[in-house]
Amino acid sequence: MSKTLDILALTIGIIGALNWGLIGFFNFNLVQFIFGSGGLARIIYALVGICAVYLLTFYTKTGRSSIE
């Protein structure tokens, strides 16, 4: 389950990062374009944020393997 959660979080994080890239380069918000500016878009943003917090744990995983 942990590997599945890692892959899911990484995928959602990448999608969020791509959306930020689109906003930065082209002033185009893909999430808002697809889901509108209502509650569903806020849920998507919240999921990306939760995944980012979860992905912070990857630093401890990589830190342990590189030290050993």
Image (cartoon, grey):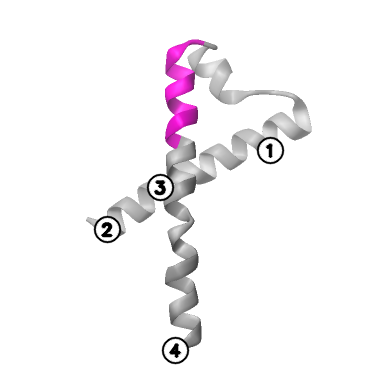
Q: Which residues are magenta?
A: 38-47
- Callout in the foreground (2, 1): 2
Q: Name the spot of residue 48 as percent of width and height, x first.
A: 48, 37
Label 2 or label 4, whichever comes before in sequence order: 2
User: Circle 1 — which element?
Assistant: helix
Which numbered disc covers residue 9? Answer: 3
- The image shows residue 21, relative to residue 43, as above or below, that is below
Q: Name the spot of residue 37 as percent of width and height, x first.
A: 54, 12
The residue pinned by badge 1 equals 21
The residue pinned by badge 4 equals 68
Label 2 or label 1, whichever comes before in sequence order: 2
Q: Amino acid at mark 4?
A: Glu
Q: Name the spot of residue 52 as percent of width and height, x first.
A: 49, 46
Label 3 or label 2, whichever comes before in sequence order: 2
Label 1 or label 3, whichever comes before in sequence order: 3
- Callout in the foreground (1, 4): 4
Measured in 3D between alpha carbons, the distance from the residue under mark 3 to the one under mark 2, in whole angstroms, is: 10 Å
Q: Name the spot of residue 51 as percent of width and height, x first.
A: 43, 44
- As drawn, the residue found furthest toward the bottom would be 68
Residue located at (50% from left, 29% from top) = 45
Are the residues flagged by discs 2 and 1 in contact, CB closer than 8 Å? Answer: no
